[in-house]
Amino acid sequence: MDTPASNNGNKIISVKGMRKYFPIKKGILKRTVGYVRAVDDVDLFVNENETFGLVGESGCGKTTLGRTILRAIEPTAGEIEYTREDGTVVNVKALDNEQLRQTRKEMQLIFQDPYSSLNPRMTVLNIVGEPLVCHGMMDGRELRERVRELVGLVGLDPRHMERYPHAFSGGQRQRIGIARSLATNPRFIVCDEPVSALDVSVQAQILNLLLDLRKKLSLSYLFVSHDLGVIQYISDRVGVMYVGKMAEVAATKDLFDNPLHPYTEVLLGSKPKPDPRLRTRRTIPKGEVANPANPPSGCYFHPRCRFAKDVCKTDAPVLREITPNHFAACHFAGELPLQGPGVVQTTSARE
């Protein structure tokens, strides 16, 4: 049986048993008294020229997982296999500093906040060209021409390369950040909520830009977001995270039309409809999100789940294939009467 880390195509990233625990220290001696399980035994893969969407509530570990895959944060345990352009597979976790530096030419990150991610004392030319200088790839006139090409590629006017970040809007700043991430000709990019700080109209422009770039440059994305609408629009496959664990993985349409995990049902029910006359089924879970520093036994979602049984309180479910290429970490996946985001009735706008 395939697992979520199996190769269902030409995979570019394969993550197995990923864990990232942050120590909790107390007292004058700063002794470790526990751990925050930000990422807790996650498996996933991303195929070439694919967008894998990662969705979940704030604090579920999405961003930590993305940065750990790039080793911007050191993983506690697990394997990160990356397939280079020449077909060789490397374990990113085992690379030394120089090897990691070379590999990072092909693996880049788009940051969430277009305001804090750009140095206010650097011009667009210096910001976008910095990765090329750091990797010793080019300088002088060649560098300037490359930056001009990148700035035009993301829809900005190359004449503004000498301007500073404060002269641009939020959407334009994010375009600068995207241009920077493309400087070294990467193949895999982690998009860390790249549109969450932008207006809705600008979000659509940036999403369309990312889709165009993926097609034009043969890119692969791990796209992190808490916005279901954004995930549905841009993703080929979706992984749902809850308290550091993967709850469900499936093709986008399959997951949105036929959720198999109760937590996915909750997320889909929370997605707003643009027409106020349309009312959707909503399943409101009881209680609060589990504490990753002290998670419950068994299934982490069981204290909030309306279908929970005794086995859910004692045995942790594994992520298993329920239907072809549709995985869920639930003891009763495929047996539960879960509700998708379907509309149940149309009401008067006056109601």
Image (spheres, rainbow, N blue to C red):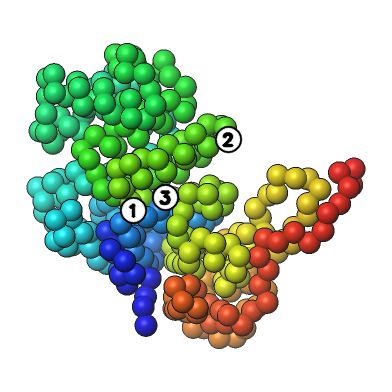
Q: Residues within 10 Å of mark 3 (few under 14, many from 20)?
A: many
Q: Earlier in the sequence, mark 1 or mark 3?
A: 1
Q: Earlier in the sequence, mark 1 or mark 2?
A: 1
Residue 318 at x, y percent in the picture = 44, 78
Please identify, in this view, whether the residue under mark 1 or under mark 2 is nearer the observer: 1
* Residue of label 2: 200
CB under 8 Å between discs 3 and 2: no
* Front residue (pair 101, 230): 230
Quarter of the rendering containing residue 96: bottom left
* Residue of label 3: 223
* Front residue (pair 28, 113): 113
**SS at circle 3:** strand
Residue drawn where x is 37% and y is 75% of the image = 3
* Residue of label 1: 49
Q: Residue type at mark 2? A: Val
Quarter of the rendering containing residue 155: top left
Residue 187 appears in the rendering: yes
Residue 43 at x, y percent in the picture = 36, 68
**SS at circle 2:** helix
Q: Residues within 10 Å of mark 2 (few under 14, many from 20)?
A: few
* Front residue (pair 152, 347): 152
Separation of disc 3 and disc 2 at Cα? 17 Å
Residue drawn where x is 52% and y is 31% of the image = 202
Q: In the displayed structure, would residue 293 be above or below residue 178?
A: below
Q: Residue type at mark 3? A: Phe
Q: Earlier in the sequence, mark 3 or mark 2?
A: 2
Separation of disc 1 and disc 3 at Cα? 13 Å
Residue 7 at x, y percent in the picture = 30, 70
